[in-house]
Amino acid sequence: MEEVEDKYILLIEDNPDDTALALRAFKRAHIRNKIVCVDDGVEAVDFLFGQGAYAQRDIDLLPQLILLDLNMPRMNGLEVLQKIRSTPHTRRLPVVILTTSNEERDLIQSYDLGANSYVRKPVDYDQFVAAVSQLGLYWLVLNELPQAVRKP
């Protein structure tokens, strides 16, 4: 597996079309950070905690931002968020829920479990690009992280 650079984004999305759309939106928004994509919650947890296929990964190389879908097979986004917030190593990572869900209970549970932000995916491509650009600017440029999260 290739080495992950500093200030990368972890995109947790099970829909290949939504992943492709997000990658195109990042490119169009001139966000140059590496994007690591995983297909479901189980793979995300394995990646973050250096388990399974990612057992050789340096778990000290944490993402600058996690974009997390809610509706996924095997382990949903809320379960992933709960796991991220349950350990000192990952609990301060910025997690933005990026979902199509309009359910108020998903919004409330996301914040109750420690999401930093909840963004509904715009249906319109230009609006989606604008949302991704704003997310990138805020979370990758303006937002300050504690040293424990920033360390390479």
Image (cartoon, grey):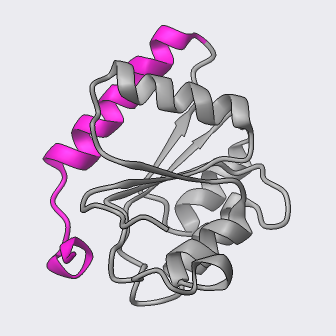
Q: Residue furthest right?
A: 74
Q: Is residue 68 above or below residue 18?
A: below
Magenta span dominant secondary structure: helix
Q: Position of residue 51 (x, y in %)?
A: 62, 85
Q: Quadrant of residue 137?
A: top left
Q: Position of residue 87 (x, y in %)?
A: 48, 89
Residue 139 in view? yes
Let me know if residue 127 is in the magenta part: yes
Which residue is pictured at 47% across the width and 9% down the height? 126
Q: Position of residue 62 (x, y in %)?
A: 36, 71
Q: Is residue 15 above or below residue 3?
A: above
Q: Is residue 122 above or below residue 80?
A: above
Q: Which residues are magenta?
A: 124-152
Let me know if residue 135 is in the magenta part: yes
Q: Quadrant of residue 95?
A: bottom left
Q: Nearer the viewer, residue 63 or 3?
A: 3
Which residue is pictured at 35% across the width and 74% down the height? 92
Which residue is pictured at 26% across the width and 57% down the height? 7
Q: Is residue 6 above or below residue 18?
A: below
Residue 3 is left or right of residue 55, and the answer is left
